[in-house]
Image (cartoon, helix red, strand yellow):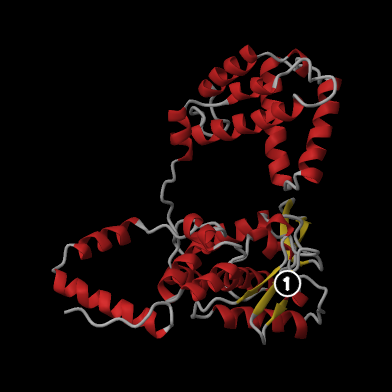
Amino acid sequence: MNKLNPANERIKREYFAYLKEARRASEATVDAAAKAIARFEEYTRHKDFKRFHIQQATAFKAHLAEAPGVRSGQPLAKATLFQTLKALRAFFTWLAGQPGYRSKIAYADAEYFNLSEKDVRVAMASLERPVPTLEQIEHVLRVMPEVTDIELRDRAVIAFALLTGARDDAIASAKLKHVDLTERRFRQDAREVRTKFSKTFDTWFFPVGGEALAILTKWIEHLREKHLWGEDDPLFPATRVEVDPTTNRFRAIGFERKTWSNAGPIREIFKKAFEGAGLPYFNPHSFRKTIARLGERLCSTPEEFKAWSQNLGHDHVMTTLTSYGNVQTHRQAEILRDLGKPKAKRDALADDLAALLSAHGVIAPVSPSA
């Protein structure tokens, strides 16, 4: 095993501090950068970064393209190559401006960590991923058990994710005081809730219907009335485990008066819930896409969709449309087939849409089609 290079370790610590403090990068981003740099160092046998030359970058790209994935054993995906090289390019660009490295590394040297244009297009290609329907989520909620405290909590986690579209880390860190059932609001206070980019904003419950609101209400009342929990207690407490003396294995025995330290348990709850319902696993983030698509159907004015987008924590509507609002393939087919219908029928549909927009003041009144 190769020994670590002390000089490399020192400059890496400076870079990670730069990412975190100056660039305000998340822990996940810093971890990804550290992983990419470690991969490169392993290839170069921890050679000092001051001895970097462009041949190392080109050889590393070729090596990475043939390296098998740890889990699959198959060549790494183009997206993985792209993200790894992107992180290295950013690191060496920064390194070229640091004392002691300026004379050794040119800014242009970092560009050798680029993929070909063809591979970049492959890496950036967006494939449609399955998104759960409201009916599927409702089915999951109906069949989930609700006897023990843990079962009640897990069911409420799914319901809360549907009502708010909150990210898993925000759900894992929420406290009772952040939820107002009267206002039907989740206050994502970044001082205590782990939100993306440490952004504070309010989310009012989405009008998803079904049992979700009743399930969440029952859970919160259970915490307050049975366990006598207060405002600063966790909304979804971490599981308490102990070693079973008969099997010598860990077992759940209830929950603790603290939040989870990360979102891993939330994803496990989702996985168990969907498998228990006989459905494929949908991760927590997929619910945000379900909600975005619901908004496309329910919102009839730009103002309404802007409010819907803000409720997801997006500053710009285009974020919702481009990240979550792509037209599903089957719906794309329906639209194209409808465009082939007789023009008279299409004009009638257009008149209906124009009348709707006019009623909401989005466009001026128009006369019906001839």
361 lies above or below 20 = below
Horizontal and vertical percent for residue 273?
54, 63
Residue 138 appears in the rendering: yes
**Number of callouts:** 1
Depth check: 99 or 295 in front? Answer: 99
Q: Position of residue 326 (x, y in %)?
A: 42, 57
Q: Residue at x 21, y 74 (%)?
A: 347
264 sits left or right of 327 in the view = right
Residue beneath disc 1: 235
Q: Amino acid at mark 1?
A: Leu
Residue at figure coordinates x 69%, y 62% from the top left = 170
Q: Is residue 8 above or below residue 213?
A: above
Secondary structure state at the residue bearing disc 1? loop
Residue 105: image quadrant is top right
Number of residues whose C-alpha sits closer than 10 Å to that of mark 1, classed few (under 14), some (14–19) or many (20 or more): many
Q: Quadrant of the C terminus?
A: bottom left
Position of 199 compared to 344: left or right?
right
**Closer-to-camera residue (348/126):** 348
Q: Quadrant of the N terminus?
A: top right
Q: Quadrant of residue 329?
A: bottom left
Q: Position of residue 323 (x, y in %)?
A: 50, 55
Residue 135's quadrant in the figure? bottom left
Residue at (32, 77) in percent of width and height: 353
Image position of 322 (left or right of 100)? left
Give the residue at x 72% y 66%.
200
Q: Position of residue 95 (x, y in %)?
A: 76, 26
Does residue 77 appear in this view?
no
Between residues 220 and 18, which one lies in front from this camera angle?
A: 18
